Amino acid sequence: MPDLLKLLNRIISRSNGKNPKNDTSDPSKEILSILRKVPQGRLEALLASGLLEDLCAVNAGFINRKNFREFIGLGYVPISIEVELRSGVVLQPPEEGWQLKKDYTSKLQNLNLRGLNNPFEEITLGLADFFCEGENEIPGEELVKRSKIFGGLGEIHMQKLLEKRHAIPKKWQRFFLLFPETIWLRLKDRTLWVPCTVFRNDGWEKEYGKINECFTPPCMLVIDNRRRRPIILDG
C-alpha cells in the first residue's frame, strides 16, 4: 500500500477508535478500497488541488452523478451486473426448435467447478467498436472471431443488462448491442444466431442476429470494461 494510503488509514483509525480493516460496518473501509485503486501521483494531485475536500463538504443529495460525470468528462455512469457462475444455470431457447450451440457461461461454470468459492462474477459493461477503418460490413463468422479478441459477452449478460435497462446510457440507444459469446442453432434451416438488443419504440428489445449474414455499423460489442485494452485491427 502506498505510504499516503497508510497515513490515511491511520488517521481514519484514530478518528473513530476502530480498525477500518476489521470493521465491516465502517464506511472508511470502502473509501480506502476506492483510494487503493488510484495511482499515487493522481491521489497526491487530488489532495493538493483541494477537490477532495470540496467533495467531502458538498451535499451529495443535490448532485446528479450522471450530469456530474459528463461535466468533468468521464462520460456515463458505469453499469455493473452480477452473473451467477453456479453450474446448472440454463438459458431458455428463444423459440421451439432452437438449440444452444455455444455459451459463454459454460466457461464461467468450469472456472467455478475448479474451486472458485464465490458463485457470482461482477462485471462492468462497456462498448467496443469492432470494425476496421473503412469497413462497412463484416460476415457473422468474423464477428464471432473478433468477439474473442475484444472479450465479448453472452446472452446471460444481455439478460442482466436488460434488468437494468433504466441505467443504460442514452448514447447506447444509437447502436445494436451484440452478445456473440452465445450462439443458437435454428434446427429447421441449420442457421446460427447471436443475441442482441436494440432500442426501438421507446424501449430496449431483445432480438437475434443471423451469423450467416453480414453485420454493419452501428453494431457494437458489449464487453467487460475491466478488461478493456487498446486494440488495433488491420484492415
Image (cartoon, grey):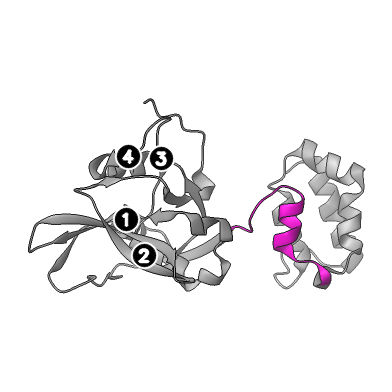
Describe residue 126's horizontal placement relative to residue 115 as left or right.
Answer: right
Q: Badge 4, how many Cα within 10 Å: few under 14, some, many 20+?
A: some
C-alpha distance separating marks 1 and 3: 19 Å
| Residue 51 drawn above or below residue 82 | above
Residue that numbered label 1 is attached to = 104
Counting from the top left corner in percent of width and height, residue 48 is at: 91, 42
Residue type, label 4: Glu
Tell me if label 4 and label 1 are in contact, CB under 8 Å.
no
Tell me if label 2 and label 1 are in contact, CB under 8 Å.
yes
Q: Badge 1, how many Cα within 10 Å: few under 14, some, many 20+?
A: some
Mark toward the viewer: 4 or 1: 4
Counting from the top left corner in percent of width and height, residue 40 is at: 77, 38
C-alpha distance separating marks 4 and 1: 25 Å
Residue that numbered label 4 is attached to = 137
Q: Magenta residues? A: 62-78
Residue that numbered label 2 is attached to = 156
Residue drawn at point x = 45 percent, y = 50 percent:
223
C-alpha distance separating marks 3 and 2: 21 Å
Q: Is residue 225 visible?
A: yes
Counting from the top left corner in percent of width and height, residue 185 is at: 16, 59
Residue type, label 1: Tyr
C-alpha distance separating marks 2 and 1: 8 Å
